[in-house]
Image: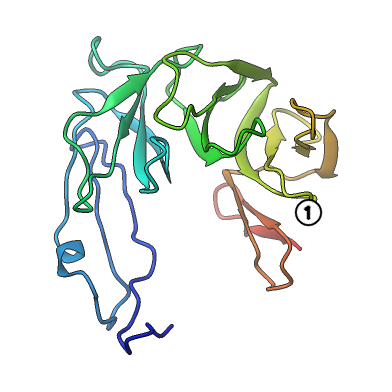
Amino acid sequence: MSHPLGRAVMKPAIVVASALLATGVAFASPAGATIDYPRLLVSQHVSSGGSVPEATAIGDLTGDGRKDLAVANGSGGSVGTDDLVFVFPQLIDGTLSDAPFSVTPSTPSDGYELAVGRLNGDGHPDLAVGVPGVGIDLFFGTGSGLPSTPDATVSTAFTHFAVGDMNDDGLDDLVYTKTGAPYSVVLRPQLLLGGFGPENVVASHLQTQGLSLGDIDGDGRTDFAADGPANDAAAVFL
């Protein structure tokens, strides 16, 4: 991909949560790429305390046009930082703040999942925190931050979830896998007037280790991929 000035454009960075380092952030560029911003060659580590990080997500959660990092801590590491989601705002120089703020999910968990999307129609990015087997907590962005506790919880017994526009209406939807047979993948479409519609089964008999959304075949529509358990192959639905 060419830059207007003839330089190569930096592709999206990779962010890794490190249990050993109680949250590590690694910025990595594609092999052989020319980097516009040399600072991205240096890893920056941020700390969310002594707890074990379970998940990360990236999005503008502070309303300043810059992408921030969210890190979900699990249970059993440190009482002061367990079962919290920390948000590290991106600063104007492109680094992450060392003074994060935190939000509290509705239920403690060692399996939090995170996603960022626009989930209530006000145009601000929101944070979705999945608590497997319990539900998906929704923290609606205010344009400058997040509430300290969930604005709403979508109650469902799920294993993995993702956020994206699955029905081409311009609204981000919830997609998740149900626990137990027949191991369905379910779509809950966001409604124009707020909230989410009833469950629509989009695939069944599909045990998964994770879900990913994106336009895989280049047709402009959102597809999803389900990671298979153990040595099973991933399944892609176009």
**Residue in the foreground of this view, choosing between 144 and 19:** 144
Q: Is residue 188 above or below residue 26?
A: above
x and y percentages locating residue 88 in the rendered image:
28, 35
Q: Helix, strand, or loop for circle 1?
A: loop
x and y percentages locating residue 1 in the rendered image:
43, 83
Q: Which residue is mark 1?
A: 168
x and y percentages locating residue 142 in the rendered image:
48, 27
**Residue in the foreground of this view, choosing between 33 and 94:** 94
Residue shown at the point (79%, 49%) measured from the top left: 169
Q: Amino acid at mark 1?
A: Asp
Q: Is residue 4 visible?
A: yes
Please identify the residue farthest to the bottom as the structure is shown: 6
Residue shown at the point (37%, 82%) measured from the top left: 3
Q: Quadrant of the C terminus?
A: bottom right
x and y percentages locating residue 65 in the rendered image:
40, 48
Dividing the picture into quadrants, the one containing residue 151 is top right
